[in-house]
Amino acid sequence: MLGRMVVKAILKNPGVSLWTLGALTTCAILAALFATMAMEVQQKMSGELRHIGANAVVYPITSPASSQSASTPPQVDWPTIETLLQTRGVKTARVALRVGLIEGRPVAVAAANPQSLTVMTGYWSVTGRRPSGSDEVMAGRSVAKMLGLSVGGRINIQWLSGESPGQYQVVGIFESGDEDEDRLFVPPGSLTVATAGPARFAQVPVTHPQVPGVTAGRYADCLSCHAATDPKIRNAAPLPLSAGPTGAGNSLPMTSDFGYLLMSVPGDGSAIRALEQAINNLEQPVQLKPLQQVLYGERHMLTKINLLAGLALTAVAVLTAMGVCAAVLARVVQRRKELALLQSLGATRWAVGMLLLLENTAMGVVAAASGFVLGTALAQGVVWYVFHANVQPRVAALAAATGVTLGVCLLAGWLGARRASRLQPAAILRGD
Amino acid sequence: MFFRMLIESFVRRRSRKLLAVAAVWIGLSLVIGLLALGLDVGDKLNREMRSFGANIQLQPAEAAVDVRVGGYELVAPGRTVYLDEADLPRLKQIFWRNNILAFAPRLTTQARLAGRSVPLVGTWFNHHVLLEDADPFVTGAAEVFPYWQARGAWPMNPESCLVGAALAQELDLGPGDRVELTTDQRSTSVRIVGVLTSGKDEDEAIVAPLSVVQRLAGLPGKVAEVQISALTTPENKLAERYGRDPQSLTPAEYERWVCTPYPGSVAADIQNAVPGSSARVVRRVAETQGAVLGRIDGLMLLLGIFVLIASTLSIMGVLSSAVLERRGEVALLQAVGAHRADVLRLFLTEAVAIGLAGGVLAALTGQVLGGWLLRVIFDSASEPHGVLLILAPLLGLLIAVAASVPPVWRTVHQQAARLLRGV
């Protein structure tokens, strides 16, 4: 009986029912939209920021050396680590660094897979293009300036490890604004030993007089003091310095290979900590270091964006609540004769109030369901427009749409019931 | 007669009219508040990009290329070239001086501590840069490196310093400890006031006020580099073209490039101001800025449109409801001889008055609300927006009229007799 009355009441007053349903659906749409957006924007923005490079790095830990001779740091099983990371959706780029000599000047040369490196360094501004062939090189702006390199030029790199010198064509010059500008980048095939073997320390000849105004002793002193500051290096490699002030042909200790892994980890600091634990479980002599600067910045920005979305949702909830209350009150006004008749037939004010609440709740349920669908579709449109990506229907969004809509329904229903309870049946039925 | 009816309508239905004004006021206050927020959000979010650190780095033009491999740093001889600390106030005298939000110089040397060599980094902490014809500009590490986390306090005098977290753990140092730093030139005793976590090289260093490091390094008034946080516009095609080939820009395009605070043009301005310097854009930060702001602009626009639609519908609902309640009154007016146009005019005039009153109130409170929201979200003051003072009453008027016309129109076209009988 009650259910039938509710259905009839909704259907017999199509105009004001549609108005109320429209207001409630708008409320549900906006609640679902903003709830979906709040979750999607965080994820999509985080993903967007992940396109701008690494947020963590894995590098080898060297153990203390036992003698004064050159030491060999422990072997790292990089493929195992990379496999673990890839199964967790982490993008990686393994970089191998070694020192080369160009015209007698030492230069850091990095080897990395061009595709992986592009993912991690998409923010570089490259004049020319990135290297792809084994005889191609891309130079950082600083090193290009120092060596007078230009796109299309050729360079000859001598390797401190004793390998035969390599001829390379400069195919690009990049700007990054960080220390990478001091390096040359080549594809991994260019360095036959670098990516596979362990780091080695070697004494190699450096032609010093080609560095104006500086003696080999100055080089050696600088190297000595800086290497000694890093506990990993200090412990790993006691440096047999033999450089003297006499010029050409002095020896400098250098690492010939040093591998590390750039990682772009989806998610926040907790995802990186979980990954660190997983890497530790592999018992490899490596350490994961989150890039605090990137993580802090991302967290900070996402917090602000979430605050903005939450605020907009609150404002929308308040505004739509106003609209729904107005619609429900209009519904009471339009149906005052019917409500007066019910009361004259013996319905208590409480029963009339309950009827109105039930009508609202029924419409609220329909509005929440349709609002969730439409809100998710609208969120899809917004996310596609802003991020060119798809959204997933979220249970939380359905909960938000239902919660907010029913909350507004109950509030409006209570106001409507209160208004209805003030009606004077006799006067209304008389037409006063 | 018309005005008497209008005034009577307001006097006799005071509470209803106040309710309608309140509905417009509250709804529009939210809209204006969000609009005020929206107008500032791009700028505020841009400032928030400082959380990623400096976006421009200034170095000596002749600085040599360092060779760093696996912790080795082969410092090339050009490192003997430094910038003068005395030139740094010029950063606040350039064309883009208002876009320079913060800067901090750095000087790194080696010191002996507890029998071992440790990096010693000097920078500014809460430094007052004296400017001509302006208040001192307060800047330092906390502003430029917001991701630095100091457990304890920041150094506030030349006798205090921070110790990097890794170094503190290794040497068992903590706040309150006093350490003796020695270089070839001299030695000094400083007290550790905080443990620093930066996620970078500073974790294994002592970080002290710049003057301390300059004294220990024997380099008074010198700095190795300056990290600068500048408010910039994300790069677009024009900036990219300039980056690839400055000569490819026409004179008009070049003027536009110069007059837009792209990272590159601000860096060029900085470089010109500081003798012997080379400014480079930290591309990672600049690109992040572009990505975030590009997305946020679109997002905020869409959110703003949705909020505006929701508020308009809600206010219209409230006002329509108020008009519907007065159908009997409309019928009575028609029954005593009023023309439809007269009734419409009466109701529309009421709507105009309600809309304007609500709008004027919303113009005031909306701006206050927007300012409050900015303070809550960005901890920053808002700029007054004159346009909102005009927009709010106009919006109120439009919404009130739009909300009143359909129900009044419907009512005046119904049969007065049926309405009066309550059918």
Image (cartoon, grey):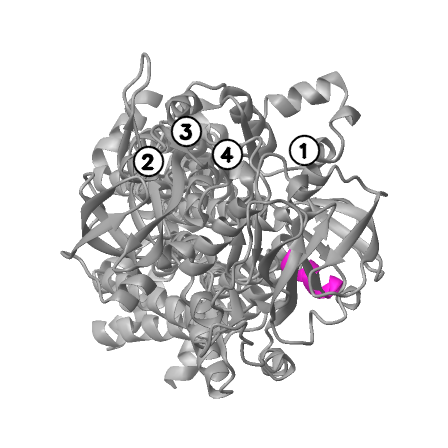
- A5 relative position to A173: left or right: left
On the image, the x and y values in percent for residue A55 come to: 52, 62
Residue type marked 2: Gln
Instruction: Determine if marks 3 and 2 fall on one subunit.
Output: yes
**Location of mark 2 (residue):** B214
On the image, the x and y values in percent for residue B62 come to: 58, 31
Residue A160 lies in quadrant: bottom right
Q: CA distance from mark 4 to mark 3?
A: 41 Å
Q: Along the polypeptide, which appears first: circle 1 or circle 4? A: 4
Residue A214 lies in quadrant: top right
Viewer-nearest of labels 2 and 4? Answer: 2
Q: Residue at x 39, y 28 (%)?
A: B393
Instruction: Determine if marks 1 and 2 fall on one subunit.
Output: yes
Residue A81 or A106: which is nearer the viewer?
A106
Residue B90 lies in quadrant: top left
Residue type marked 1: Ala
Q: Main secondary structure of the magenta part?
A: helix
Viewer-nearest of labels 1 and 2? Answer: 2
Q: Is residue B394 visible?
A: no
Q: Along the polypeptide, which appears first: circle 4 or circle 3? A: 4
Residue type marked 4: Leu
Q: Is residue A327 visible?
A: yes
The vertical placement of A170 against A150, above or below, is below
**Location of mark 3 (residue):** B388
What is the total number of numbered labels drawn onto the structure image? 4
Q: Secondary structure at mark 2?
A: helix
**Location of mark 1 (residue):** B239
**Residue B52 falls inside the magenta stretch:** no
- A415 relative position to A360: left or right: left
